[in-house]
Amino acid sequence: MPPAPEDTAGSGAVPASAAETSPSPDAMAKYHAAADAANRALTAVVAGCVPGAAVLDLCRLGDATIIEFTKSAFAKSKDILKGIAFPTCVSSGSAICHVSPIEQDASSIPPLADGDCVRVELAAHVDGYIAHAAHTLVIGASTESPATGRKADVLAAGHACLDVALRLLRPGKTNWEVTEVIEKTASEFGCKPVQGMMAHQLDQNVLEGKKRIVMNPTAQHRKETETETIEAGDVFSLDILVSTGDGIPRNVETHRTTIFRKLPDASYALKTASARGVFAAIKKDFGDMGFSLRQFVGTELGESKARLGLVECLKHDLLTPYRVAYEREGEHTAHFIATVVITPTGPVVLTASHWDPTKVASEKSISLPELKAILSSPIRDGAAKNPKKKKKKAQTDGQAA
């Protein structure tokens, strides 16, 4: 289990003074339950990332852990949907994100090998309240033999971007202010945020909300993305993706697209029985959450019928696909996600990472005074006023994002 949120932000509980501008106690309890499942799943998958591990097995492990620990949450509430909010992805090599294979494709994905830079992403939900998490590691890196070179640079850059961005997620700041500081931080390590990737506001049953923080935006992104003010009560999936390359993702279709999400309020009079059956199953079992083709294995439809039915659903824009994005061969990418609740005194961090600075030996570091000043500030006001908590934080510094 990763360090509890208080190791990073002082306390996983929302301060009493913030009660009126935070999610309701019921919602917070469900966010915490989802976060517990996501943290446990991330822990299990990261521990399983060893030489020889099969990507499909790791994805199944993450999904099964989410299901196990959300199943026991709010067990007396029989009518609520809970489980996977975004299927487990294990991406390595040039694949930036969204590698989540089905059985048919498993043999085409090489097992993990020593030195691989691996990105793990997943999300859980309880009654639509979502906890999203991601971590990046280098297989075989240790305190005695840490990651070096450009792999170390990109890991250090990604974690530093997350650290800096967390300190700007405060009421009154804007999404573009966060975008700017992420770009400056990545540049300190000779890296770039992956273009067009976004950190989204979360809400009940909403994986991609209205407020967005765009990474490495193009002119079109700047035109289409409104300036949004961060407010107490907002919940964000702070999604950081950085690259040693040009940061421009490529869609080369090396891997099959296996992850989809129903678009809110989407409807169409589907013609085929297979499409009607799969769309009905999606609405009933997944709601508006992300799902994988793997989740149809063992169901009445089955994976093959589901794949057939998805064709018509996609044709009529009932679903959005999450295609695998790629960087140039030889470049490295890092992915970190923290789910945070914004309070008047700063963010409460719900999903922790497994960051260990002793396993990463980058020769680059933060030099800009502006960024140093941000990093020297607490994530949340008053977070370290309790001496015991301050001491505990010092002992665990670097283990959680």
Image (spheres, rainbow, N blue to C red):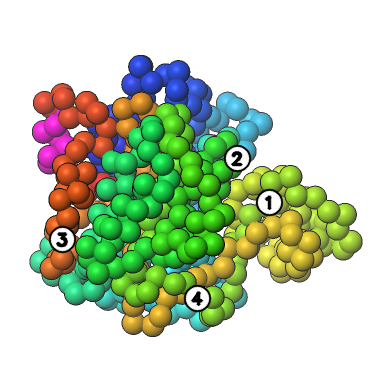
Q: From the viewer's perspective, is residue 277 above or below residue 57?
A: above
Marks 1 and 3, Cα distance to the nearest angstrom? Answer: 41 Å
* Local SS, label 2: loop
Marks 4 and 1, Cα distance to the nearest angstrom? Answer: 24 Å
* Local SS, label 1: loop
227 left or right of 373 in image? right
Residue 205, numbered circle: 2
Mark 4 surroundings: few (<14), some (14-19) or many (≥20) residues within 10 A: some
- What x and y, as percent, mark residue 324? 52, 70
**Which amino acid does the dot numbered 4 rest on?**
Arg
Answer whether labels 1 and 3 touch (C-beta < 8 Å).
Answer: no
Mark 2 surroundings: few (<14), some (14-19) or many (≥20) residues within 10 A: some
Query: Start and end of the magenta stretch?
Result: 389-395
Figure quadrant of the N terminus: top left
> Which comes before the other along the chain, label 2 or label 4?
2
Q: Main secondary structure of the magenta part?
A: helix
**Which amino acid does the dot numbered 3 rest on?**
Ser
Q: From the viewer's perspective, is residue 268 above or below residue 22?
A: below
**Which amino acid does the dot numbered 1 rest on?**
Leu
* Residue on which the image places disc 4: 250
Residue 271 visible to an observer of this rendering: yes
* Residue on which the image places disc 1: 263
> Which comes before the other along the chain, label 1 or label 3?
1
